[in-house]
Image (cartoon, rainbow, N blue to C red):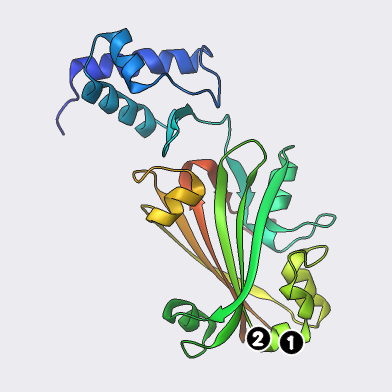
Amino acid sequence: MPRPPAKAQAITSALAARIVEGEMAAGAWLPSERELAREFGADRSTVRRALRMLAEQGLVQARRGAGVQVRPERPVRRAASDVTRQVGGWRGFHVSVRADGRRPFTRTEVRETGADAQVARRLAVPAGTRVLERARVQGVEGEPPVQTATTWVIMEIVARIPVLREIDTGPGGIYSRLEEAGHRITFEEAVTCRMPLVDEQRTLAIGAEQPVLTVWRRARDQDDRVVEVTHRVVVGDRHELVYRYGSGA
């Protein structure tokens, strides 16, 4: 692999030192490319390369249309088991964020729609089948969003649990309502990594070069029937997924 130009490396090192030593705090915005080029006596292409190297080191994040920002102090630490346990009125993402002493937010939209081929395959229904879609954007107050989470529920379940059409489905959310209706739920998740789509870049305030995790989760009832599917798109460096294994876990 070719070595980066010495000038770009020198700019990267100087900015990294300011971040590590606290001169630029978590969440602070870096000067513009023009200002950095003037300060370091370099052209903007060199500054741009230095900023990319800073991002590769995990010290900054580029936000489309806004600039380059020092990364928040810590990502959301998400325990895989948080989806199965209720703490007060919360499950899942809200449990993880609150356990870290921070305040979560969720913006939700609900609509009835036809399942596309990908969703239909995971729900084990024909493409075009009517389903309830619950689309959320979630994050920590005062910070960019961490993830989108879109859930599709088969209409037979919605007919039995009409509160699923509401923005607020009550304490514990969808999975608590399923349990109350007599469903014993087990989960399976498939996790991959890719670069973000254009609409994801806009929604999550990330650049095209910032990887995301995609998580497909299926909920099955006691009859091994898929009753719900959720697709999460998670900004890789804003999220840490923790698994625990073993008989004592």
Residue 159: mark in rendering: 1
Residue 167: mark in rendering: none
Q: Position of residue 205 (x, y in %)?
A: 48, 43
The amino acid marked with disc number 1 is Ala
Res 244 seen here:
no
| Residue 39 vertical placement versus 166 (above, below) | above
| Residue 127 vertical placement versus 217 (above, below) | below
| Residue 206 vertical placement versus 85 (above, below) | above
Res 62 seen here:
yes
Depth check, front residue: 204 or 188: 204
Q: Secondary structure at mark 1?
A: helix
Q: Is residue 9 left or right of residue 109?
A: left
Q: Position of residue 149 (x, y in %)?
A: 58, 61
Q: Residues within 10 Å of mark 2 (few under 14, many from 20)?
A: some
Residue 155: mark in rendering: 2
Q: Secondary structure at mark 2?
A: helix
Q: Is residue 119 left or right of residue 153?
A: left
| Residue 138 vertical placement versus 84 (above, below) | above
- Asked whether the residues under the numbered discs 1 and 2 touch, taking CB atoms below 8 Å apart as contact, a structural biologist would say yes
| Residue at 55% across, 52% down | 147
Disc 1 versus disc 2: distance between alpha carbons?
Answer: 6 Å
| Residue at 32% across, 8% down | 39
Q: Residues within 10 Å of mark 1 (few under 14, many from 20)?
A: few
Screen quadrant of the N terminus:
top left
Q: Position of residue 84 (x, y in %)?
A: 71, 64
Total numbered labels placed on residues in the image: 2
